[in-house]
Amino acid sequence: MHRFVRILGSSLIVLGIGLLVVVGALYLYGVYERYRFEHTLAMQTMAEAALGIDILEGERATPSPPEQVLLEDPRPADDTVREPFIPTPEQPKRMPPAKWTRIPKIEVDSPAVEAPLEKGEWQAPKFVAGHLEGTANPGEVGNVALSGHVESIASGNVFARLKEVSVGDEVILVAGGNTLTYTVAEIKVLKNDDLAVVMPTTEPVLTLITCTGTWNPLTRDYSERLVVVAKPTDKGGP
């Protein structure tokens, strides 16, 4: 009996040490992934600065050539009557994408980078908020959609506390030289394949998305999405 107890005790000690090693390895892996992400982001910022790209505006910081307005049809001179030349109007210039997001209620203060659309799915970035490719930019009429991980050792948990947000809470986006303030208007939980939350809208809206529900190890995804919808705080907002 005593021998059995000793064997059991030794086995439990070995098991405990093994668990500590696994947890420690996972923690170190998460630290390494975050360091690698931050290093890559810093190198990208330095490269953009070296190339003369305005990080906030997302455009090259070279001056535009002076505008030339033609008052006459620029066809060769002849005996025909010249008609006024009307330049074709250009497409409206888009606002810059989101570069930073703050949610004071849950202490979110994070950069925002593009979340590219690949094979029909948006790829949420690691450790920071992702501005979904193809959705509106802050200051435009439409749906500005941001997503973030809820809990991941290798990808972070920027929106881990999004479930604590309440109607009336403040969300702040920084885009270019503009700071836009939104107020949470609605909170809902939807199926993970419900794309209605990222569809274009006819009014300015901010949509924050993260995972919730049950984790499925086969699909490596959660069953539902937590969706926070906010609207511009001021009438003069976006």
Image (spheres, rainbow, N blue to C red):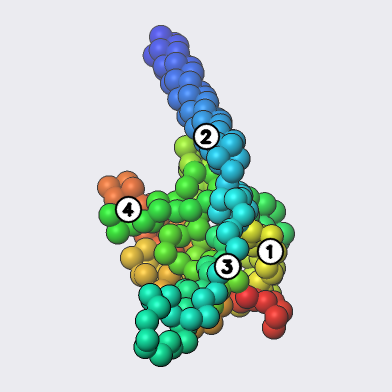
Q: Secondary structure at mark 1?
A: strand
Q: CA distance from mark 2 to mark 1?
A: 26 Å
Residue 67: which disc? 3
Q: CA distance from mark 3 to mark 1?
A: 26 Å
Mark 2 or mark 1, which has the lower sequence index?
2
Q: Residue furthest front?
A: 79
User: How far across and how far down the image is residue 175, in percent?
Assistant: 62, 60
Q: CA distance from mark 2 to mark 3?
A: 38 Å
Is disc 3 in contact with disc 1, using a CB cutoff of under 8 Å? no
Location of residue 63 with respect to 198 vertically, above or below: above
User: Mark 2, residues whose alpha carbon is within 10 Å: few (<14), some, or many (≥20)?
Assistant: few
Quick one: quadrant of the C terminus?
bottom right
Location of residue 128 with respect to 188 vertically, above or below: above
Is disc 2 in contact with disc 3, using a CB cutoff of under 8 Å? no
Q: Secondary structure at mark 3?
A: loop
Which residue is tagged 4? 118
User: Mark 4, residues whose alpha carbon is within 10 Å: few (<14), some, or many (≥20)?
Assistant: few
> The disc labelled 2 sits on which kind of residue?
Thr
Residue 40: which disc? 2
User: Mark 3, residues whose alpha carbon is within 10 Å: few (<14), some, or many (≥20)?
Assistant: few
> The disc labelled 4 sits on which kind of residue?
Glu
Which residue is tagged 1? 178
